Structure formats: structure tokens, C-alpha cells
């Protein structure tokens, strides 16, 4: 076991107007844009590859909006692959993936980010054997470079505590030979000591576009591995805390909201070999519309 450094032993002091991370000069407002110290990954003039996709693909309300009305469900992913190079797989959060199941995805010309099973991120009661089952299934996608990342999305309840820092380190070490990306939903994780620890191990972090509300995640820019990751969750303030998995992300971005991300995406792509951008505002095909809009914006800027 590696030493419990960085987020594993770091402490935080609360101040009335923000946070001060131990061992860094970071002091930030909870609600404003965080200005982070530059991490150890150097920015270059060379822009890495940017790949845009959506969080999931199997949505009935995409039929007639994206999928042709007469297209059979078993042909949806094939159709999706004709338009995108990358897709997040969400079913693995609800059902532990199986080797034979993952082998079927090898026939598609896509890169996949596989969401970690909920027992690892939300219930956190998974035995080592269950983690091994997940690992064995997902590593199948490493054949022919189909695996973009394993997405470990933690809930708001996963706060920055010594117990959770220890758990996170052990979990990431268990999966270390896979490309890993962590998404936090509790704002206390947004600190330089966490970014530095992730960078040390080449573990990625997901940046978010989400509602800027009390208790929500502040905006931050950080690339901690050769993978940069950005997820657009929508800005539905009314349903963020009370909504379900559909209404929470029910939001359509305006053109100007996406254009505002251009300099940040450019910066992100200069720090990573590959940048994955995923739209999770899937209701009524809004993710498809916004993904296409962002593609156009980035093409005009000659970033893709």
C-alpha cells in the first residue's frame, strides 16, 4: 500500500468566506470560479485530441429526435457510432458488468468510459472480490484501445473525511492499471492537495458544468493525468437536489453558454493527450443537440 499522502492525510480549515487547503495557497469562494495553482502537468502549444460524446445512448425519447423512428433498439449503438467516437456506459453503475457483455462492445468503433458500479462509489460496501469482478470485465475494453476511462462518480455524501480519503486511495490503487477518472460532487474535495495527489498517480479528475448553487460544486479547471475529462450536467437549479436522474439533468444549453467554454477547453486540451467531453443532459435528446453545437464551435476554432 502506498503512503497516505495528499488527500489521504490532508486537513482543511474552514473560513467564513471560503476554504484554505493545507499546504497550498488556495483560498477560494465557494460560489465563484476557482483560480487554481498550476499543477505539475505543463501546458504546451500543441493541442491534444478532443473527443465529444454523450453519457449513455439507450434512451427511448431519443427515437425520432436522434434515432430514426423505424430503427431497432439493437441497432442504436451502431447508429450512434456513425456520428460519435466516444460514449459513456451507464448501465455498469446499476448492474455489475460481465466479461461476455463487455466483449460485445469491441465490435463498435468507439471509445467507452465505463461508470463504476454503485457499490464502489455510493454504497461502498464492495468486497475486494467484487472489485476484481469489475476490473476483469472492464479490462476487456483495453483490447484495441476501446477503453477511454473508468468513471468513478461519487455522491455529495462522499465528503472530504479521513475515512473517505483512505477509502478512495485504496480503491484507486486496486484499479490502478485502468485509466481512471474521479468525479466529486462534494465541494470540499476541490483543493490543490487533492489535485496534486491525483497528478502524482496519473489519476484523472472530471471537471463539471453544473448549477452554481449552495452546496454544489464550484467551477474549477484541473488536468491531473494525460486524460482530461469534462461533463456537462446542465444548469437545472430547481431540480438539482430534489429531482430524479432525468429531471436533475433536464437542461438545454444556449449557444453562448457553450461558447464561453472555448478558452477553457483549449487550455484543457493543451495539458492532455486526449480530452473527453460528455453531455449528460440526456432528456429529449438535448445532449445530442448540445454535443453537435459544441462540435461546431470547436471546429470553427480549429480545435477538432
Image: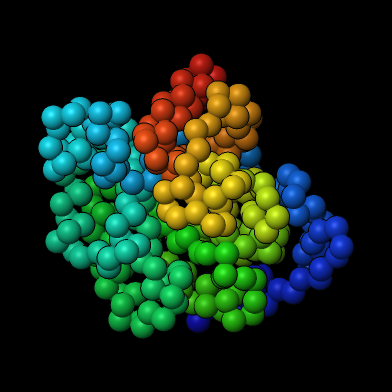
In the foreground, 122 or 105: 122
Give coordinates of residue 148: x percent, y percent.
37, 49
Left or right relative to 141: residue 173: right
Q: Is residue 304 above or below residue 12?
A: above
Snapshot quadrant of residue 74: top left
Residue drawn 63% across and 39% down?
A: 43
Residue drawn at the location 31% of the way across and 77% of the way down: 130
Residue at 63%, 28% in the rendered image: 260
Q: How is the image coloured?
A: rainbow
Q: Where is residue 153 drawn, in percent x and y?
A: 47, 60
Residue found at the very far top of the displayed protein: 300
Outermost residue toward the right in this view: 16
The quadrant of the rendering that contains the C terminus is top left
Task: Identify which residue is drawn at 38% across, 45% down.
Answer: 55
Eyeballing the image, is 177 above or below 42?
Answer: below
Q: Is residue 196 visible?
A: no
Q: Horizontal and vertical percent for residue 253?
A: 53, 31
- Drawn side of residue 24 relative to residue 40, left or right: right
Total label count? 0
91 left or right of 194 in image: left
Q: Which image quadrant is residue 161 in?
A: bottom right
Residue nearest the viewer, comparing 198 with 134: 134
Percent across and percent down for residue 154 are 51, 64
Q: Is residue 140 visible?
A: yes
Amino acid at each position: 500500500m502506498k503512503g497516505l499522502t495528499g488527500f489521504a492525510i490532508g486537513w482543511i480549515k474552514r473560513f467564513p468566506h471560503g476554504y484554505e487547503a493545507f499546504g497550498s495557497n488556495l483560498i477560494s469562494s465557494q460560489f465563484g470560479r476557482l483560480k487554481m495553482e498550476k499543477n505539475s502537468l505543463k501546458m504546451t502549444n500543441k493541442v491534444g485530441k478532443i473527443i465529444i460524446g454523450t453519457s449513455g445512448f439507450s434512451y427511448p425519447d431519443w427515437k425520432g429526435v436522434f434515432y430514426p423512428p423505424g430503427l431497432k433498439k439493437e441497432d442504436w449503438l451502431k447508429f450512434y457510432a456513425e456520428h460519435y467516437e466516444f460514449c459513456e456506459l451507464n448501465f455498469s453503475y446499476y448492474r455489475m458488468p460481465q466479461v461476455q457483455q463487455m466483449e460485445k462492445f469491441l465490435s463498435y468503433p468507439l471509445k467507452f468510459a465505463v461508470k463504476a458500479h454503485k457499490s464502489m462509489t455510493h454504497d461502498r460496501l464492495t468486497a475486494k472480490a467484487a472489485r476484481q469482478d469489475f476490473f476483469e470485465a472492464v479490462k476487456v475494453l483495453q483490447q484495441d484501445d476501446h477503453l477511454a476511462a473508468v468513471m468513478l462518480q461519487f455522491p455529495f455524501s462522499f465528503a472530504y473525511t479521513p475515512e473517505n480519503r483512505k477509502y478512495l486511495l485504496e480503491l484507486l490503487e486496486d484499479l490502478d492499471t485502468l485509466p481512471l477518472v474521479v468525479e466529486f460532487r462534494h465541494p470540499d474535495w476541490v483543493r490543490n492537495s487533492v489535485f496534486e495527489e491525483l497528478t502524482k498517480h496519473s489519476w484523472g479528475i472530471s471537471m463539471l458544468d453544473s448549477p452554481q448553487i449552495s452546496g454544489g460544486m464550484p467551477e474549477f479547471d484541473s488536468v491531473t493525468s494525460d486524460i482530461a475529462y469534462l461533463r456537462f450536467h446542465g444548469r437545472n437549479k430547481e431540480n438539482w437536489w430534489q429531482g430524479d436522474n432525468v429531471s436533475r439533468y433536464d437542461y438545454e444549453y444556449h449557444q453562448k453558454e457553450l461558447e464561453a467554454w472555448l478558452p477553457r477547453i483549449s487550455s484543457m486540451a493543451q495539458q492532455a493527450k486526449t480530452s473527453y467531453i460528455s453531455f449528460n443532459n440526456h432528456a429529449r435528446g438535448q445532449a445530442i443537440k448540445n454535443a453537435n453545437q459544441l462540435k461546431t464551435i470547436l471546429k470553427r476554432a480549429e480545435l477538432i
